């Protein structure tokens, strides 16, 4: 009886998770990703970095073509980040969303905010497969 209960519980868990996995994969396939990596100048303060993080994080509230946003700082133990410390991951439904974003006044204001604070910037765009 104990094994039967365990099997039943596992089957129930699989039924709950399985229908969602293909839906999540399908939703992400074909979206337009905009990946931005920053290395800050050495003289930039923690407060200034926080201001940049908050400002970038507010862009989805101001630009409705952004469908998802996340960011984080480098935690890789490989030490091959070439000084890049911050990764911002912006998702659009398609390339047209990015084309609205780039000249948008909120984005241009953000670009002005980071100007002079960055030692290096890398941008990679791709279509999710």
Image (tube, rainbow, N blue to C red):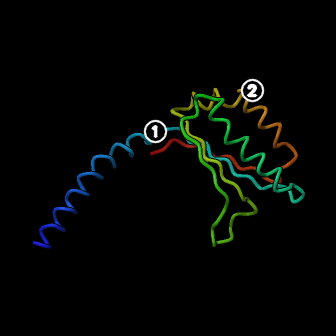
Q: Nearer the viewer, residue 61 or 85?
A: 61
Q: Secondary structure at mark 1?
A: loop
Q: What is the number of the mark on residue 77?
A: none
Task: Residue at 64%, 26% (x, y): give it.
Answer: 100
* Residue 93: image location, x then y, percent: 51, 33
Residue depicted at 85% across the width and 49% down the height: 117
Check if mark 1's residue and mark 2's residue have beta carbons within 8 Å. Answer: no
Mark 2 element type: helix
Location of the C terminus by quadrant is top left
Residue receiving disc 2: 105
Q: Residues within 10 Å of mark 2 (few under 14, many from 20)?
A: few
**Residue 35 at x, y percent in the picture:** 63, 47
Q: Residue at x 12, y 68 (%)?
A: 4
Q: Position of residue 63 (x, y in %)?
A: 64, 29
Residue 48 x/y as whole percent: 83, 50
Outermost residue to the left? 1
Quarter of the view holding residue 60: top right
Along the viewing direction, whichever of 60 and 28 lies nearer the viewer: 60
Q: Nearer the viewer, residue 69 or 129?
A: 69
Task: Tell me if 2 is positioned left or right of 105 in this view.
Answer: left
Residue marked by disc 1: 30
> Between marks 1 and 2, how big is the CA–CA gap?
27 Å
């Amino acid at each position: 009886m104990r094994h039967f209960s365990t099997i039943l519980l596992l089957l129930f868990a699989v039924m709950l998770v399985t229908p969602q996995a293909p839906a999540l994969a399908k939703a992400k396939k074909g979206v337009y990703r905009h990946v931005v990596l920053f290395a800050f100048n050495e003289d930039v303060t923690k407060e200034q970095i926080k201001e940049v993080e908050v400002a970038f994080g507010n862009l989805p509230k101001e630009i409705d073509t952004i469908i998802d946003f996340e960011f984080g700082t480098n935690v890789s133990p490989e030490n091959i980040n070439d000084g890049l410390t911050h990764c911002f991951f912006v998702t659009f439904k398609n390339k047209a969303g990015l084309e609205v974003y780039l000249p948008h006044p909120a984005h241009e204001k953000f670009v002005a905010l980071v100007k002079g604070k960055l030692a290096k910037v890398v941008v990679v765009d791709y279509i999710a497969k």
